[in-house]
Image: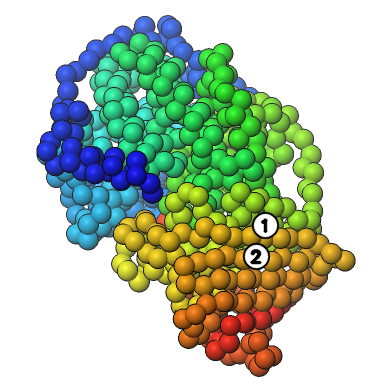
Amino acid sequence: MGVRYLIFRLFYIIKSKIGYLKLTFPSNPKFVKFISLEEWKNNLPPFFFEGKNINGLVKFPDPLLRANFEEIKNGNFVFFNHQKVHLPKDYDWITNPINGFKYDIKKHWSQINDFSKSSGDIKYVWEKSRFSYLYDIIRYDYHFSDDQSEFVIDEILDFIEKNPINKGPNYKCSQEISIRLFNWIFTLYYYKDSKNLTSKKFNIIINSIFWQTHHVFKNIKFSKICVRNNHAVTETLLLYVISKVFPFFKNSEKWGVKGKKWFEEEIDYQIYDDGTHLQFSMNYHRVVIQLITWAIRISKLNKDSFAEKVYKKAKSSLIFLDTCKDIKSGKLPNYGSNDGALFFKLTSDDYRIYTSQLEDLRAVLTGSVYQECESTFWYGVHPKLISLDIKLGTKRFDKSGYYIFDEENCKTFIRCGSYKNRPFQCDNLHLDIWIKGKNFLRDSGSYKYNTNQEYTEFFTGNEGHNVPSVNGKNQMERGVRFVWSRWVKNSEATISVKENRLEFIGVINTSHAKYKRSITKEENINRWVIVDECTCRDFDKFLQYWHVPIELDDLINLTSVDSEDNSLSIKKEQKWFSQYYGVLEESIRYTIISDSKLIKTTIEIK
């Protein structure tokens, strides 16, 4: 992680222990009154929309929207965009609804332990406190011509009352604070003309927004040095957006100037030149493009612009994610860390479908879309519809090591890369196969970030991916929490189509072995031949793992031989799959074990 990281973490821990952070982030700070609600509305800074006038969006009272809204009113919230969790009407915002653990609201946030066995996964406390559920209410409100301003505003005020500034778990993470404020800003603009948004309530809300932004600014180095991923993008963008929508805040100009500069730096650093993202995660990359969509739209409305590199990286990201997307389903491989994050859900699409988020970015970048989506209207954009020109064949993204072979009804997705930034999972040489919208060979997902050792080892290690393994070892050595050591630093890959046949060769060097994976496939024939070889000193056995959905198992046939063409037995096991954070599904894993250093497997799909 580097010397700078180690020094900063050391001093950060010392500051926390001696109480310095308590002074920097004061609890219950002085109430600051800025301008009145009427003054704000009379000089309203530009935003995606003004009030309930969503220009061009035809109202469609979808029964699903009404059902989602009724569920929320009855205390049933969708966590991580899939899991239903019931919360009582007097919910305190600090109790883990899964295990009942209640955080101490009297403690300063710097004293909160966010990773402990007794507390469980803190994300279950943070999830409602993000306020992303407000989009379901606002969309219901709009399409059904209703007014839920009283309920929504009371939810925000209840949070403010029960979560004093810088106290308790909901101030532990600056990204969580930032997400919450983005969603409050969206809400304030939508309900700006509501009789339920009084001047007194407005002042309470913006005072809280001010101090929460103050927290983000004061703690920004932690994300920029220690985390430096989508957290830093979220927090730096918040500072910029706050300066535009609340220019009357003390320090607003300073926050905006620095936030813009830092945001530009993070986008340039985190998105590689080929459009891939340093977290090696499809979902975290979507998080970043949603933030870029906000950034580009807000800047344009305020007659501002970012450095050219932001737009360049945005366009290259769009190309990469478009390439990885399965056209029929709208989904991408369940590849990389997946914590259920979708900050701004402005359609009724399933969480796994990426279509609207990609089209939103395309709309703000180019003014056009391949597919019409409700969400673009919420950003105040009315794009023209253009035809999708699908280019078949091989695509390569060498900076991160993604290799894709597109056919008319089939996508072969391969990962083979080295790391210059922190890896999160042992999934090198992973193979994903999609046919007509169905994911036949797939990544197992992430499940939870704070769970037992068995699940952690499975979902983040080799065992949860379609990869080879010497002696059952992971490709890297596991450290504490999210940390891996002995990163894969050397890799190389080639992909081509010769005489209508796909040929891929990928090589990675790990601390314990050199792996080589070769894949061949005839065009338009659903048969893959995968040859895995290893070179190592300490050798006992060679393994391959293949993960398939239970419902598609009958359509898949595997055969395997060793280096002497001896048939290998294939072990069929019940394992797990998690396409939504915190949710386990039964799945099938085929495990092949060989005493030789070569395994040749043929996979045929009907």
Tell me, for residue 262, which label it has, or none. Answer: none
Furthest-bottom residue in this view: 566
As measured in the structure, the alpha-carbon distance from the residue carrying label 1 to the one carrying label 2 is 10 Å
**How many residues crowd mark 1 within 10 Å: few (<14), some (14–19), many (20+)?**
many
Mark sitting earlier along the chain (1/2): 1
Residue 196 visible within the image:
yes
Compared across the picture, whether 265 is left or right of 214 comes to right
Q: Which residue is drawn at 58% across and 90% down?
A: 569
Where is residue 273? Give x, y as percent: 62, 40
Residue under numbered circle 2 = 506
Q: Quarter of the image holding residue 304? A: top right
The kind of secondary structure element at disc 1 is strand
Could you tell whether 317 is left or right of 214 in the image?
right
Closer to the camera in the image, 113 or 31? 113
Q: Measuring 69% from the left and 28% from the top, which residue is drawn there?
A: 366
Give the percent coordinates (x, y) of residue 539.
49, 83
Q: List x then y, in percent, for residue 429.
A: 59, 65
Q: Is residue 12 left or right of residue 134?
A: left
- Residue, disc 1: 403
Q: 140 above or below 249?
A: below
The residue at the point 65 percent across, 35 percent down is: 315
Please, which residue is most extreme toward the right here? 499
Residue 165 percent across, percent down from the top left: 21, 30
Q: Give the foreground label among 1 and 2.
A: 2
**For this rendering, which residue is in front, 58 or 80?**
80
Q: What residue type is labelled 2?
A: Gly
- Evaluate if marks 1 and 2 touch, with contact meaning CB atoms under 8 Å apart: yes
Tally the marks: 2
The crowd level at tag 2 (other Cα within 10 Å; few <14, some 14-19, many 20+) is many
**40 relative position to 46: left or right:** left
Quarter of the figure with the C terminus: bottom right
